[in-house]
Image (cartoon, rainbow, N blue to C red):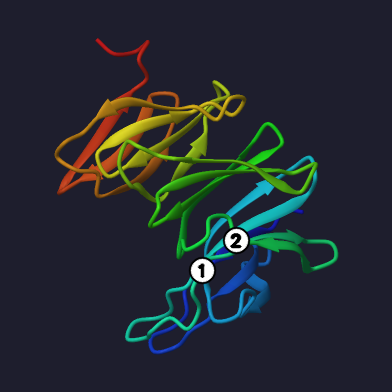
Amino acid sequence: DGMIYVGSYAPYGELGGAMGVFDPVAGQVVENYRHLIPNQSICALAYDAESGLVFGGSSIAGGGGTTPSEKEAAFFVWDPVEKRIVRQMVAVAGDTTTPAMAVAQGKVFVVTRPSNSLSVYDIASGEMVDHRPIEHGSVVDVCLGLHTDGMLYALTNNAVIRIDPATHEVTKMASWDRGVRCGWAMSEEGIYFASGVHLIRWEWPEQAG
């Protein structure tokens, strides 16, 4: 609908973040849903153009100086026409935050911590169809995306990984032992991330050398 959906953590000393809807033409927030998941922050969002649905993940963490009141992070499906959550569940029991999420091939790929698991939600059936560990480091916040080659790529704290949307297989593409501090930018040249004070680019394998 031409809008930008933004998740947020709660202010200092408070629980319960929000999902805001920003109109880039008007230059302002036109909808704001505080406590969409009660007492939790909204830290991951993804959109599926085919179904028109927005998918989200929460964190039990609140603003600075707070103690979480909830025990598990939530995965939810938001209908932007009806303006309500139409489905909600826990992706992995005991996990407390959702650092990254992306849509590919009619499925939502959801990363949760501290188990560092990949969960796969089938949009048509409305069910989680797969859960598997990510064994190549802890996925960095907001560092998962779909490339033009049809594969999903992500950053962990020490590697670049690829996820096959068809098989859900997770493959380590490269190691970076000096540590991945944050990201994320993905282009036809490669994937960019920060390591300490340095900006690093991992080139696509066919471009290396």
For residue 141, above or below residue 123: below
Q: Closest to the observer: 153 or 172?
A: 172
Residue at 38% over, 44% down = 184
- In which quadrant of the rendered view does residue 193 lie? top left
Q: Which residue is mark 1?
A: 72
N-term-proximal mark, 1 vs 2:
1
Q: What number is the disc on residue 62?
A: none
Query: Is residue 24 something that shows in the picture?
Result: no
Q: Position of residue 43 (x, y in %)?
A: 50, 63
Quadrant into which the C terminus falls: top left
Query: Is residue 83 something that shows in the picture?
Result: yes
Residue at 34% over, 46% down = 183
Image-based side of 57 in relation to 205, left or right = right
Q: Position of residue 10 (x, y in %)?
A: 47, 80
Q: Which residue is mark 2?
A: 90
Quadrant into which the N terminus falls: bottom right
Q: Is disc 1 surrounded by few (<14), some (14 to 19) or many (20+) residues within 10 Å?
A: some
Please, which residue is most extreme toward the right here? 82
Q: CA distance from mark 1 to mark 2?
A: 7 Å
Residue at 58% over, 55% down = 91
Helix, strand or loop for disc 1: loop
The reply to whether dot 1 and dot 2 touch (C-beta < 8 Å) is yes
